[in-house]
Image: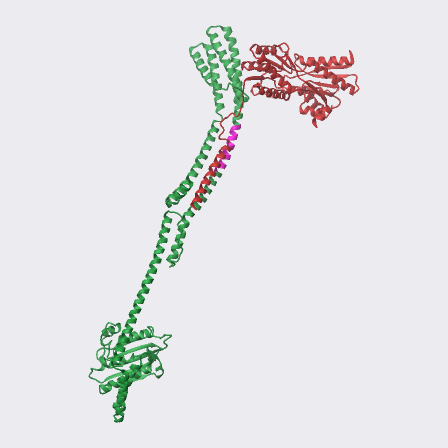
Chain colours: A green, B red
């Protein structure tokens, strides 16, 4: 049965448990109170009934008086009222007498009751004889009998009085005892109540602790989870109440979150892999495009051929042609050679020189090219092929179609720890909106992106970003149409450090 | 854990209930019988003793009551708890009216006493006189000692005392109750006188006188006895006491008036105080009645009469003289 009770207890709801607990404690207190009340009530009842025996004896004594008086009245008046009163009181007295003890016992007061009973029987017999004699007008007889009856009446009174005294003494003792027990009882009842109260308090404390402990543990676990720690142990479910259900649900939730995070991680990893592949694809594509271009013109052949052309021009004393061919050859050689990622700034500048020379030859000195380079910065490493496409753009979109003398200025200087590379032209200029579009890459596929060499502005920006880990900056300045353009690349003075005071 | 809680709470409740039950028992709330335990008996005997010499009568009553209990009879000390002080005769009459089954009373030769005893017997209530007899009455039995024999014993004690003190003359004062109808003391006196006469011959020089002690008022015995000691010129050589109260008063007066040794006291009864006085040789010797035997014989004779209709008219109670040496031994 106990086992059944316990299992049932485990399946009770929190409300039922707490209600049960409070009911139990309340019932205990109520029971104790009721019992105390009952005991005290019974004791008070006994205190009240202590003197009841005296009351009964007084009643007996009074009734005896009535018998005697009514008899005397009858003797005096011989009235029917008095004889009626005599019979009534005699009847009453007999009824009261019947309550007296008639057994022989060793209990003093009970024995006195027996004596009173027997004396009373004799007395009533005498009074009856007196009445009878009075009726028979036997004056001498009733006079004598009356004297006997009166004597006995006084004796009975003495007996009743003495018994009353004895009982009063005994009752007083009982009363004293009862009062003492009542006092004792009060102290005890207060003690018992205090004890029960303490017991109940400890019961409530321990029980509510047992109820709230899992809740507290749950709260702690929830706090841990809230702080991001999902690696907590699964919490034990102790009972099937609300706390148990919430604990189960919490366990499940933590597990679900853990699973979800794992899935998310896997998905992200997969996405990253995909992105990486895409990037690789792009770089491969560019690589392929480059390889394709390189394959189109066999650089070695071209280079050798151009060198041969240059030698021929030398032999024919065509110095300018020779120089031109030499420049062209060098231009191509750079292209061939620069398959690596980066190059010295000097090499890049040299390539620009070659390129501008070739353009000047092609377009009959149309371009006024000048440069202002801080010599100390020539060894700085930069991604290869970044200056030439920009100069190419400056020529193609800046000064090619203008009516005035085109100028291109390349300057390399240091500014606040950063290295600035500026390509300035006095050409057609660019509208601000277009600058925004170019920088944000919205003009993909446009000429700005794929110059004559196939390497566009976007490509330059991307490679600068990658090479300098987002620390490099490319800016385009133009005051408007026909106001010229400046492309300014700002790279950190130290690649590793990457610091650059703005 | 909840299981533990349940066990704990059940144990707690059980402890509370057990405590309350224990407490309930402790405060004797469960007591049903208000008058306590008592036994029921078949017969009801009334023992009427009067107020005098209560120590002596207490012992007799105690033994009678205990004997009665073994025989299915309860002996009541009739009139003991009454608020009014009745005389022995009145009490006998009341006992008759209260329809007791038997009466034990110290008798005397007073006509009134004889009348009430006779009334009782006529009403079918057997009467046993104890210690003192009412010879002229219809009483069924007398339980006591032979007064004449007792008188002879007193006489022999007086002779011993005189021999011890090498006296051939002297005066002996016997304290007697004022009640002249008391045959017991008359017989004792006769016994004393005859014994002395036998010893010393007729017209001997030992005078035996009596002093009546007034019993009509309470405490008057003590005053009367002190009066004897106040008149030191007339002090007797030997003072004979015939009951316990007289003995005690005489010895106390002898001590108070510095007459120990000059007045030799012959006592009656063996209460602790008297024995102590005997051991201190303030009282020369005392006669002890077997109170236990007295009580037992009273009840036995009543029972015998009720059961068979006959009983012995006289049942003798043993007496014993206790001297200083005996008392010392007893004290040890």
Q: Residue at 46% across / 7% down in the picture?
A: A135
Residue A298 position in % (x across, y down): 26, 82
Comparing B212 with A356, the one in front is A356
Quadrant in the picture for residue B190: top right
- Residue A7 position (above or below residue A180): below
- Residue A308 position (above or below residue B105): below
> For residue B65: magenta?
no
Quadrant in the picture for residue B87: top right
Left/right of residue B200 with respect to residue B4 in the rendered view: right
Comparing B237 with B131, the one in front is B131
> For residue A178: magenta?
yes
Which quarter of the rendering shows the C terminus of chain A? bottom left
Q: Main secondary structure of the magenta part?
A: helix
Which quarter of the rendering shows the N terminus of chain A? top left
Left/right of residue A343 with respect to residue B299 in the rendered view: left
Q: Is residue B149 visible?
A: yes
Comparing A226 with B250, the one in front is A226
Q: How many marks?
A: 0
Residue B241 position in % (x across, y down): 70, 18
Residue A84 position in % (x across, y down): 43, 12
- Residue B151 position (above or below residue A296): above
Quadrant in the picture for residue A231: bottom left
Q: Is residue B256 visible?
A: no
Left/right of residue B164 with respect to residue B1 in the rendered view: right
Residue range (magenta): A173-190
Residue A379 position in % (x across, y down): 35, 81
- Residue B29 position (above or below residue A400): above
Comparing A105 with A187, the one in front is A105
């Amino acid at each position: 049965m106990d086992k059944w009770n316990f299992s049932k207890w485990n399946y009770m709801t929190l409300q039922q448990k707490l209600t049960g607990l409070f009911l139990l404690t309340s019932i205990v207190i109520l029971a104790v109170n009721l019992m105390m009340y009952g005991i005290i009530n019974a004791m008070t009842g006994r205190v009240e009934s202590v003197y009841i025996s005296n009351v009964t004896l007084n009643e007996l004594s009074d009734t005896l008086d009535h018998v005697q008086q009514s008899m005397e009245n009858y003797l005096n008046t011989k009235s029917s009222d008095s004889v009626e009163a005599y019979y009534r009181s005699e009847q009453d007295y007999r009824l009261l007498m019947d309550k007296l003890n008639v057994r022989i016992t060793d209990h003093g007061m009970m024995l006195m009751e027996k004596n009173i009973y027997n004396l009373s029987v004799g007395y009533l017999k005498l009074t009856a004889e007196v009445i009878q004699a009075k009726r028979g007008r036997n004056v001498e007889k009733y006079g004598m009998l009356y004297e006997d009856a009166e004597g006995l009446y006084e004796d009975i009174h003495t007996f009743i009085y003495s018994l009353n005294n004895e009982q009063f003494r005994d009752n007083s003792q009982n009363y004293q005892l009862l009062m003492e027990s009542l006092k004792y009882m009060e102290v005890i009842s207060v003690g018992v109540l205090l004890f029960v109260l303490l017991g109940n308090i400890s019961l409530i404390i321990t029980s509510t602790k047992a109820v709230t402990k899992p809740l507290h543990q749950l709260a702690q676990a929830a706090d841990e989870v809230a702080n991001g720690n999902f690696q907590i142990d699964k919490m034990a479910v102790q009972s099937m109440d609300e706390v148990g259900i919430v604990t189960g649900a919490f366990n499940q939730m933590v597990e679900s979150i853990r699973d979800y995070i794992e899935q998310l991680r896997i998905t992200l990893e997969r996405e990253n892999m995909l992105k990486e592949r895409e990037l690789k694809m792009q770089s491969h594509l560019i690589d392929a495009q480059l390889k394709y271009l390189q394959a189109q013109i066999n650089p070695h052949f071209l280079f050798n051929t151009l060198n041969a052309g240059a030698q021929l021009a030398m032999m024919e004393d065509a110095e300018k042609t020779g120089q031109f061919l030499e420049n062209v050859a060098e231009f191509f050689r750079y292209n061939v050679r620069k398959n690596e990622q980066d190059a010295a700034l000097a090499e890049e500048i040299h390539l620009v020189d070659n390129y501008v020379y070739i353009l000047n030859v092609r377009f009959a000195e149309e371009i006024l090219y000048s440069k202002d380079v801080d010599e100390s910065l020539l060894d700085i490493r930069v991604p290869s092929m970044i200056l030439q496409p920009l100069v190419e753009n400056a020529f193609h979109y800046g000064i090619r179609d203008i009516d005035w003398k085109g100028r291109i200025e390349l300057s390399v200087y240091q500014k606040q720890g950063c290295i600035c590379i500026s390509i300035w032209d006095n050409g057609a200029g660019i509208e601000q909106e277009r600058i925004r579009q170019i920088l944000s890459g919205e003009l993909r596929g446009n000429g700005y992106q794929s110059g004559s060499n196939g390497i566009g502005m976007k490509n330059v920006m991307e490679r600068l970003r990658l090479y300098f880990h987002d620390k490099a900056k490319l800016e385009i300045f133009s005051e408007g149409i026909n106001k010229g353009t400046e492309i300014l690349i700002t790279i950190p003075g130290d690649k590793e450090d990457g610091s650059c005071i703005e | 854990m909840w299981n533990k809680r349940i066990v704990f709470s059940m144990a707690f409740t059980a402890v509370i209930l057990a405590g309350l039950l224990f407490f309930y028992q402790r405060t004797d709330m469960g007591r049903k019988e208000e008058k306590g335990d008592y036994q029921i008996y078949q017969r009801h005997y009334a023992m009427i003793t009067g107020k005098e010499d209560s120590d002596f009568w207490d012992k007799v009553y105690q033994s009678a009551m205990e004997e009665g209990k073994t025989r299915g009879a309860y002996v009541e000390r009739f009139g003991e708890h009454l608020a009014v002080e009745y005389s022995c005769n009145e009490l006998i009459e009341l006992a008759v009216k209260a329809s007791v089954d038997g009466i034990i009373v110290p008798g005397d030769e007073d006509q009134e006493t004889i009348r009430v005893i006779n009334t009782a017997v006529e009403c079918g209530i057997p009467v046993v006189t104890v210690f003192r007899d009412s010879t002229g009455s219809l009483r069924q039995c007398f339980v006591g000692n032979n007064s004449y024999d007792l008188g002879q014993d007193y006489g022999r004690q007086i002779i011993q005392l005189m021999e011890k003190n090498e006296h051939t003359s002297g005066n002996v004062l016997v304290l007697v109750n004022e009640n002249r109808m008391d045959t017991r003391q008359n017989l004792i006196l006769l016994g004393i006188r005859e014994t002395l006469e036998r010893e010393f011959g007729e017209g001997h020089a030992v005078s035996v006188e009596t002093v009546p002690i007034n019993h009509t008022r309470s405490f008057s015995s003590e005053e009367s006895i002190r009066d004897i000691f106040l008149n030191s010129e007339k002090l007797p050589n030997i003072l004979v006491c015939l009951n316990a109260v007289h003995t005690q008063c005489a010895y106390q007066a002898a001590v108070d008036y510095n007459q120990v040794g000059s007045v030799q006291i012959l006592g009656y009864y063996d209460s602790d105080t008297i024995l102590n006085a005997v051991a201190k040789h303030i009282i020369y010797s005392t006669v002890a009645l077997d109170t236990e035997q007295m009580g037992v014989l009273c009840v036995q004779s009543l029972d015998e009469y009720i059961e068979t209709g006959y009983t012995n008219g006289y049942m003798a109670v043993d007496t014993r003289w206790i001297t200083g040496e005996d008392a010392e031994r007893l004290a040890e």
